[in-house]
Image (tube, rainbow, N blue to C red):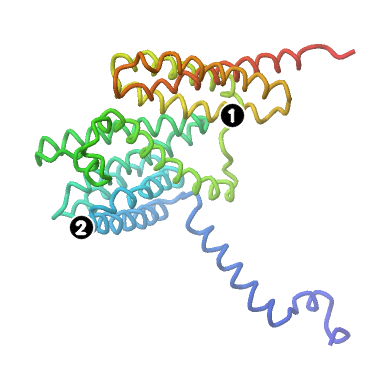
Amino acid sequence: MSRFLPTSEIAMVKSPRESHFWPRRNQTLATKKRYFRLRESPVENLTFIAMMVAFDAIVSLIAGLLPLSAVFVMLIVPFTSASVALFCKGKYLPVYLFAGFGICLAVSAWNFTNTIFYVLPAMITGLVYGMLWKAKVPVSLNLFASTLVSLGLFYASLYFLRAVTQVDMVEFLLTAIGKKEDPLAPNVFPLFGFAYSLAQMVLSHVFLQTQLERISILSNEEERLIPFHPIIAFGFALISAILAFFNAKIAYLSFGASLYWALFCVYGILAYHRAWTYVLLGIFFFSGWLVFASVYQQAPHGSGLALISIPVGFFSISCFLNYVLLRNRQKQPKI
């Protein structure tokens, strides 16, 4: 058949398997590109907002019908609002917020507490994440700031629901996980709230990262913030270690923040492969555990575990020293 067809037409002839596979694959890629892309016209913006609002309404309905599943279902709500902030123009964000909250409140009117407690904070948090991304804020700072906003809204909704419905949501959540009778649970609850808020943002970030890279919107530079990671981690670790003797709730919350920034310190260390780097880390980290063991018995009952921030603080000091030493070595002239 090849001698009767031009070369260009021969290239277009595919086997039956290829002719069935490639159109389906190209159609899937085109569908993804159609949904996750920057919106320009008013119709495109409003259409995308309508899809995200409908998705929020479905999630809110499920949370209203199955209250115990709301904690897990609401982990995906920040994704929709962050998508609106990233792919739509800023002037349409109030439209999404008011329309989304209104429709979610309408579809779950018999159980409006779920909408106030879960949906609205998650929507606002996702919008904050998207706006900070557009402002070129580094990922570590963006996730941390969005998590703090989510945590603040989480506690605001707790107090609002207590005032309106006389229901203590803290007691309800502790009962749901079987920790109501644990005397230490109220002290650790702020750390639980921080971890829950952070999980919301991380799940949204992981998915949005893949979509943004596909449409050539790269992640903001994190390298410029690497020198500050250990400083911030040490600051929160110091606050946690001091407040462990005065305020256990804030101490545990500060411990969670120090651990978060310490994980980004690891990112900065792994960028350089030096044997002495890991030796220095091991020495400081082991010294931190020795200090922890010496002061643990002196802490008030229920606050001792917050002193784990001491090894985290020593670890952050070693990370900062490693960064300074590596920078000095790079500046030394080579003969």
Mark 2 neighbour class, 10 Å CA radius: few under 14, some 14 to 19, many 20 or more: some
User: Which amino acid does the dot numbered 2 rest on?
Assistant: Val
Q: Secondary structure at mark 1?
A: helix
Which mark is first along the chain, 1 or 2?
A: 2
Q: Position of residue 80 (x, y in %)?
A: 39, 49
Q: CA distance from mark 2 to mark 1?
A: 45 Å
Q: Nearer the viewer, residue 65 or 288?
A: 288
Q: For this view, does 144 lie left or right of residue 265?
A: left
In which image quadrant can residue 190 be found?
top left
Q: Residues within 10 Å of mark 1 (few under 14, many from 20)?
A: some
Tag 2, which secondary structure?
helix
The quadrant in which the C terminus is found is top right
Q: Quadrant of the N terminus?
A: bottom right
Q: Closer to the observer: label 2 or label 1?
A: 1
Give the residue displayed 17% in from the left and 49% down from the top: 112
**In the foreground, 143 or 55:** 143
Residue with the mark numbered 2? 107
The location of residue 152, given as percent across then percent down, is: 29, 31
Instruction: Return the mark for residue 266.
Output: 1
**In the rendered view, would you say 57 is above or below 153?**
below
Relative to 152, is 171 above or below?
A: below
Q: Amino acid at mark 1?
A: Val
Q: Please give left or right for residue 319 compared with residue 58 in the image.
A: right
